[in-house]
Image (tube, rainbow, N blue to C red):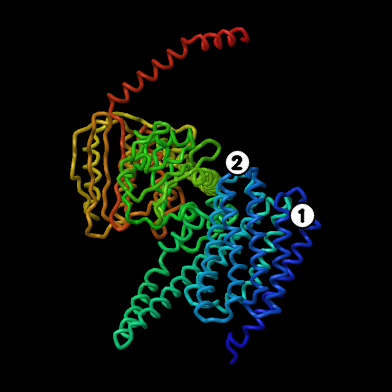
Amino acid sequence: MMGFAGLEPYVMQVSYLIGAVLSAGAGLWIARFGDRERPDRGAVLAALTMTVIWCVLSMTFQPGEPAIELAATGRNLALIAMIFRLFAADGRDESLKPTRPVIVSLALVQLMQPVLLFVDAQAGYIPQVAQIIFEVGTVLNMLVAIGALVLLHNLYAGAAASSRKIIRWSWIGLAGIFAYDLNYFTVAYLGGEYPAILVALRGAIAGVVAVLLALGANSANAHLQFRPSRAVTFQTLSLLVIGSYLLVMVLVTRSLALLGGDFARASQVVFVVLAGVSAILWLPSERLRGWLRVTAIKHLFQHRYDYREEWLRFTRTIGRGSNANATFHERAVKAVADITDSPAGLLLVPNEEAQLELSARWNWATIEVPASAGDYALSGLLEQHNHILDLDEARAAIDHHGELKHVPEWLCEAEDAWAVVPLIHFDRLVGTIVLARPRIERGLDWEDFDLLRVVGQQLASYLAEQAGQQALMDASRFDEFNRRMAFVMHDIKNLASQISLLSGNAQKHADNPDFRADMLVTLRNSSEKLNALLARLSRYGPGQSQEVREIDLARLAGDIADRFKGGHPVSLMRADPVQVLADVESLEQALIHLIQNAVDASKPDDQVFLSVSSDGLAGQIDVIDSGSGMSPEFVRSSLFKPFVSSKQGGFGIGAFEAREMIKAMGGRVNVESREDVGTRFSITLPVPEAAKLLSKRSDAAQELDAASPQSQNQKSIREEVA
């Protein structure tokens, strides 16, 4: 199989042929279409002409011939002149006077090459002299390359933004050719000879540079930019990392081989093993890939995010999750977290009292979230300002809209909590996303804020749409339920009427007084029971009324606990004396619903506890079990929704009915639950004194409103109309 040494002449011929063709084509294109007002136009044409001559001579003669070196010297002088004229293109040729001595020095150093060729020709072939001339020539070429690169750095670093667009492509081409020459002559100096592969590729490199110079010669290409996709950039960086790793391995193993003997072989084996272990540990690392991604975005791209890709990924995640068991709320958290490379997140949604509650979590099982994750003031602030809360700023006591006093302590104490993103839909807060800190430590910037706000608004519309669809489904099922119950109520009402009529007839026609008395009692009791059933079935109708009065909450709890003793252990572990305002029948029915749910969720021997307490303003009764518990998603979206039940064959209306009855009495129901731990239902009802105080305040507010000038004017208008 033929090695590179056999292919070297062919590769060199093809390479320099490519360089000659591309350089000639670039020169003709610039002469025909290039800007005629550019100061570097003449220098560019001269450099391309000398490049064509150099490539043709390189194809004709052997490397190192005087004709080739003279052509290379002429090309480099033209390139140096081009650098100076690029300073003029930026309007700085008069202001940067120190640049001229550097240009002159580089030209003089380059002109030392013909002198060396003359000395070599006069001395004849003497190995010692030839070696000295070779080393001096390579050092001089290295100096020229270094000086040119320094000038190019100063040129681009000091150029104005508008000038950089004009000189960009020419600058890239010049930097490329001189960087290649610097490496070429450095390797030649260290190796004592010109490397064959680099010699063969010089022509092709010169052709690529000619194309770049042609791009830079026309102002129409000033805004042309090379914009590789982020995926290509990350893959390229990964290949560079792998290539660098392999290069280091080769260099180290070759260096260890110089030690010789068994020690060298043992050292090579140890190094290969250590390098392999390091590669296994680091190359698949999420942290390494994250570092590469952040570094590339920071230094290679104008914007942090590829907005098209982020939007497509967001839509795919919302539409169908990678995990088939993931709920919509979990996918919503993941969709936002993926944007910032956050490894976890939470979804908090406001309840009926505008307090934030946990609705879903994604990859964040370790964080402890209280039942009330945020108060109503925080919800109002996020809703009013659409402010993305940077928790690192909150920990540093940096305040923007007065949010510091409302940030929950559990968020500040959780060091991995990073940001809180509000979800706003039509100026209303429908939820918040809490993002975990990314694997690669960084701060939030303007681009994060802009993108997260837009994504938050889009996600809020999805959540609002889902809530609307769920409400329509519930209304439809309620409608069906009400239609069925209407028939039931109609039949029961007819039955009650018939029994009442029978009671009246028996009172008139029965001959036996004892029989008549018993029949009347029986029929009267049945009629009362049926009417009571009708009243309960009509509880949610427009004619609903409750008899609210003072009751002993501890006594009621004790009576209900006694009812369950025969079937399941239910005990009253705390019974503070407290009087509350409630309807006895409705409260009793609600408690029975909740206690029965606790019994169904518990094992046969697990006790269910009742606790009665008071804080002076309200009485509270807790129903506590250590059963299977419920997930935050179920508590948020299903627990108080009718026709949704976690029990096999359950109708799913008990918890909903209990909450509605408690709300009708002016109370509220709260729930705390954890899966496999248990559940606590808390019923809070007002004490009589607090209810009276609130009633007085309400009456005073109404009187004050009625006495206002606006109300008086409205009253006068109504009287005039009447």
Q: Which residue is mark 2?
A: 95
**Residue 26: image location, x then y, percent:** 74, 63
Q: What x and y, as percent, mark residue 231?
A: 56, 63
Verify CB contact (< 8 Å) between mark 2 and mark 1. Answer: no
Q: Secondary structure at mark 2?
A: loop
Pick out the residue farthest to the front.
122
Category of crowding for the residue at label 1, using alpha-carbon neighbours closer than 10 angstroms: few (below 14), some (14–19), many (at least 20): many
- Residue located at (25% from left, 36% from top): 553
Residue 2 at x, y percent in the picture: 60, 90
- Asked which secondary structure carries label 1, the reply is loop
Q: Nearer the viewer, residue 485 or 354?
A: 354
Q: Residues within 10 Å of mark 2 (few under 14, many from 20)?
A: few
In the figure, residue 206 lies in which quadrant?
Answer: bottom right
Q: How many marks?
A: 2
Q: Among all residues in the image, which is located at the extreme right?
A: 32
Q: Quadrant of the N terminus?
A: bottom right
**In this orientation, which residue lies closer to the viewer: 546 or 435?**
435
**Residue 512, can we see it?**
no
Q: Quadrant of residue 425?
A: top right
Q: Nearer the viewer, mark 2 or mark 1?
A: 2
Work out how far the residue at label 2 is from the one at label 1, CA to CA, in angstroms.
Answer: 27 Å
Residue sitting at 46 percent across and 9 percent down? 707
Residue 154 drawn at (x, y percent): 55, 50
The kind of residue on which mark 2 rests is Ser
Reading the image, the residue beneath label 1 is 34
Q: Earlier in the sequence, mark 2 or mark 1?
A: 1
**Depicted 256 relative to depicted 142: above or below:** below
Q: Pick the quarter of the image with the C terminus.
A: top right
Residue type beneath disc 1: Gly
Q: Is 497 in front, or is 249?
A: 249
